[in-house]
Image (cartoon, grey):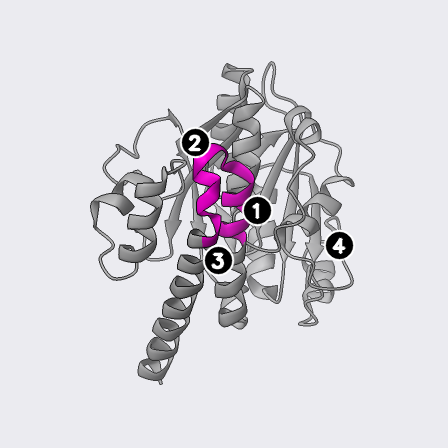
């Protein structure tokens, strides 16, 4: 896909793990959007994804990673095979609505300082998923960590997830969800892509944090709409994903915290262990009720 002055060709990287049917819909939506360079990084799905994609879209390239390498590592490997000036990175369980790519390309074309832009992400029921977020200070982070699961409308969570902000207008954000975003290859290469020490979660926060420190901006464009099924891959191993989520949060905290606050790393680590345990218990209760 080519779009206007200062834009360039769009390539897409789709990370897949046991989401065959969703993968086909994702790639179909990319084609409708005019993306002709698509690479699927498959984390050892073994669910017929390769065969189904070959039958549905022979032009899409399929990159078997050989194991479940995690989101960031798989995306990095697929990105090296793409050729576009702009790189669309997404989960296999997202579907782009008409005009989404064009709207994101327009943001990058309008401001060379913007490294990446995220779309408006909606759940399957049409509700808003809060993609643009802030880098929270310690107080907001702790408040969200321990109140977010039981009282999602608490002021800490509202601040962190920018829930009181008007999601109908384009705005700069500290970071946007890695489930779908468009990034300049120049920025992607300069930043080194995702940090592969994150298996799952927080690799998007880390990428945006590094972009910010390097002088780039991150944007949110609500005119670009994406539907996200949420958890198609992660729900297959929910407890491991809960643990990985909290490991990634600790890794990000340790890497981005300096000065006196760095002395609190052991306290933060202990708090995250407790939170992970509570999240696992909550998941177990929810699973029993679902049966």
| Residue 38 in the image: above or below residue 247 | above
| Horizontal and vertical percent position of residue 49 | 68, 65
| Residue 113 in the image: above or below residue 76 | above
Q: Give the alpha-carbon distance from disc 4 to disc 3, as whole Å.
A: 31 Å
**According to the image, label 3 marks what residue?**
246
Crowding at dot 1, Cα within 10 Å, few <14 / some 14-19 / many 20+, comes out as many
| Horizontal and vertical percent position of residue 250 | 50, 51
| Horizontal and vertical percent position of residue 289 | 31, 82
**According to the image, label 4 marks what residue?**
62
User: Mark 3–mark 1 contact, CB under 8 Å?
Assistant: no
The front one of 32 and 111 is 111
Q: Secondary structure at mark 2?
A: loop
**Which of the image's four quarters has the C terminus?**
bottom left
Q: Earlier in the sequence, mark 4 or mark 3?
A: 4
Which quarter of the figure has residue 152?
bottom left
Q: Which residues are magenta?
A: 248-266
**According to the image, label 2 marks what residue?**
174
Q: Give the alpha-carbon distance from disc 2 to disc 3, as whole Å.
A: 20 Å
- Residue under the image location 26 percent in, 32 percent down: 166
- Residue under the image location 69 percent in, 50 percent down: 73
Q: Nearer the viewer, mark 3 or mark 1?
A: 3
Q: Is residue 230 left or right of residue 240?
A: left
Q: Give the alpha-carbon distance from disc 1 to disc 4, as whole Å.
A: 15 Å
Which quarter of the figure has residue 79?
top right
């Amino acid at each position: 896909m080519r779009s206007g002055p200062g834009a360039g060709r769009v390539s897409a990287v789709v990370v897949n793990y046991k989401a065959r049917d969703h993968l086909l819909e994702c790639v179909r939506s990319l084609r409708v959007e005019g993306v002709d360079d698509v690479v699927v990084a498959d984390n050892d799905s073994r669910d017929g994804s390769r065969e189904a994609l070959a039958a549905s879209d022979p032009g899409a390239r399929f990159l078997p990673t050989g194991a479940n390498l995690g989101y960031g590592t798989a995306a990095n490997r697929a990105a090296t095979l793409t050729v576009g000036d702009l790189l669309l990175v997404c989960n296999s369980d997202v579907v782009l609505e008409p005009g989404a790519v064009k709207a994101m390309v327009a943001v990058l074309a309008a401001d060379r300082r913007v490294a990446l832009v995220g779309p408006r992400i909606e759940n399957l029921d049409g509700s808003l998923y809060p993609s643009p977020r802030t880098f929270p200070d310690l107080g907001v982070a702790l408040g969200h960590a321990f109140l977010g699961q039981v009282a999602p409308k608490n002021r800490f969570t509202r601040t962190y997830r920018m829930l009181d902000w008007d999601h109908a207008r384009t705005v700069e954000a500290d970071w946007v969800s890695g489930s779908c975003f468009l990034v300049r290859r120049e920025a992607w290469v300069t930043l080194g892509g995702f940090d592969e020490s994150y298996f799952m979660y927080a690799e998007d926060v880390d990428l945006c944090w590094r972009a910010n420190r390097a002088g780039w901006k991150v944007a949110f464009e609500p005119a670009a709409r994406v539907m996200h099924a949420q958890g198609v891959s992660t729900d297959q191993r929910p407890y491991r994903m809960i643990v990985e989520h909290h490991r990634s949060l600790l890794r990000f905290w340790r890497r981005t915290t300096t000065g006196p606050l760095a002395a609190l790393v052991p306290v933060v680590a202990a708090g995250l262990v407790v939170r992970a345990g509570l999240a696992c218990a909550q998941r177990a209760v929810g699973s029993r009720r679902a049966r």
